[in-house]
Amino acid sequence: MNFVFYDLETSGLSSSYDQILQFAAIVTDENFVELERVNLRCQLSSHILPSPMALAVTGVSPKDFTDTSLPTEFEFAQSIREFISKWAPATWTGYNSLGFDEPHLRQMFFQTLQPNVYETQFNGNNRLDIMQVVQACRVKHPDALVWVKNQKNKISFKLDQIAPGNGFPQHNAHDALGDVEATIFIAQKIAQNAPEFWALAVENRDKQAVLRKINSFEPVQFIQNFYGKMQDYSLCFVCAVGNNAVFFDIENNDPLDYVNGSDEEIKMLLERNPRVIHTVAVNKAPSLFLMTNADEVLRQRSEVLKQAYDFQNRLSNAIQQSYDDKDVAPNKPVEDKIYDGFYDNADKRLLEEFQVSSWDQRKSMLSKLKDPRLIQLGRRLTIFQGDSQNSEIEKAKATEYLNQKWFAQGDVEWTTFAKVDKDIADIKRRELLNVQKTQELEDYYADVKHKLETGELIR
């Protein structure tokens, strides 16, 4: 199966409230032979206020996303969707892609009314995160890479440090295509220096392969980065709840002390610290490895769990109940409703038609949609990215929406003008940009504020 190594540059850190500005990808075969590369950019949608600090760190200038010759975010999303379809099935991978890039990609598909927000998981596609592979490599095969330390004298897993530390030349950090090339370099290093480990790590991209591995009830090693420190656990599978596999820590706990506990005791077990119970997403290429050299104690404890059918069922029920009991935020913004259910087939068919319709047709199609999330996002999309003239009522509502959003008080996840002022003051204090580039930023935000006041932001 081919790999698609990809990276994004965005207007800020929030997958829900920022926007992708650059998408770069290199397709390779399993031997890292390049098959195709793309480097796409788009305009910033006029309802997004970018983070000055993000722009300063990535070196993105306002002219890079205000160029009207660039595609809109909607057109950009369509191009990426076509690219995904072209290379399916493939393994979609990047550096911290499951933690950063994938959530941004899903939100873009959601907010631009693409029919499927899970494009990198459908049509035979699967996922892998090279940062997770690097972290597991540190534990299992530390001789495969040169390990670079940061200013705190701790091992750094940052791509812009580990890539040059291992000989990658001229790494253009914070440029999407440069990061893709650096990621391929590191993946290739691991594959060359620790081929057996690489094969096992890549095997975990397949959810079914992970399930076969853990359903054996054999002891497994689970590796994860916990606040900058690598944690290495000896676990045994107990049950599955959705895409989460539930494990018992057999290294530090004897299951005989718990399998006959009451329902209340099992519920309390979920809150124990240090953790006895671990949940791991099996569809996110977890760093799970069979322990072929497990000692007899671990094997005996695994056998106890394998035979503890009642405990398996009751633990599954307790975890499911804990999910059901989670508070649902009242009146949460539509961006935060991305996982509030799948679209029905009728809406999916309309979304496919939406892709090839004119903007006037798209406006009229919104009333046919059933999902209120799609209706709300569709109205916003047609107002801010469509090419048809908005009514005075639509302009007034859109202007009110932007004023409420950009002048919001308190701690909100999106960028406000108050945050802009704070960021620019911080940029000046830390001298992150020269005087000219700082002035360009200030001029850009002043222009946005002026256009908001005069109503020029909305067509």
Image (tube, helix red, strand yellow):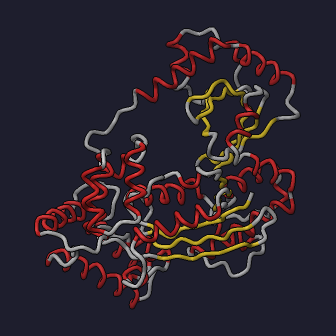
Residue that appears at 41% across and 55% down: 110
Q: Is residue 297 left or right of residue 407?
A: right
Residue that appears at 45% across and 77% down: 56
Asked if residue 335 is positioned above or below residue 385 in the image, the reply reads above
**Closer to the camera, 18 or 283?**
283
Residue that appears at 48% across and 53% down: 117
Residue lying farthest to the bottom in this orientation: 436
Query: Quadrant location of the N terminus?
Result: bottom right
**Closer to the camera, 229 or 244?**
244
Q: Position of residue 164 (x, y in %)?
A: 72, 74
- Does residue 15 appear in this view? no
Q: Position of residue 342 (x, y in %)?
A: 43, 42
Q: Position of residue 99 (x, y in %)?
A: 55, 54
**Residue 82, image quadrant:** bottom right
**Closer to the camera, 266 or 424?**
266
Q: Position of residue 362 (x, y in %)?
A: 30, 62
Asked if residue 377 is positioned above or below residue 165 in the image, the reply reads above
Asked if residue 422 is positioned above or below residue 265 in the image, the reply reads below
**Closer to the camera, 106 or 266?**
106
**Residue 155, image quadrant:** bottom right
Residue that appears at 52% across and 51% down: 118
**Residue 418, image quadrant:** bottom left
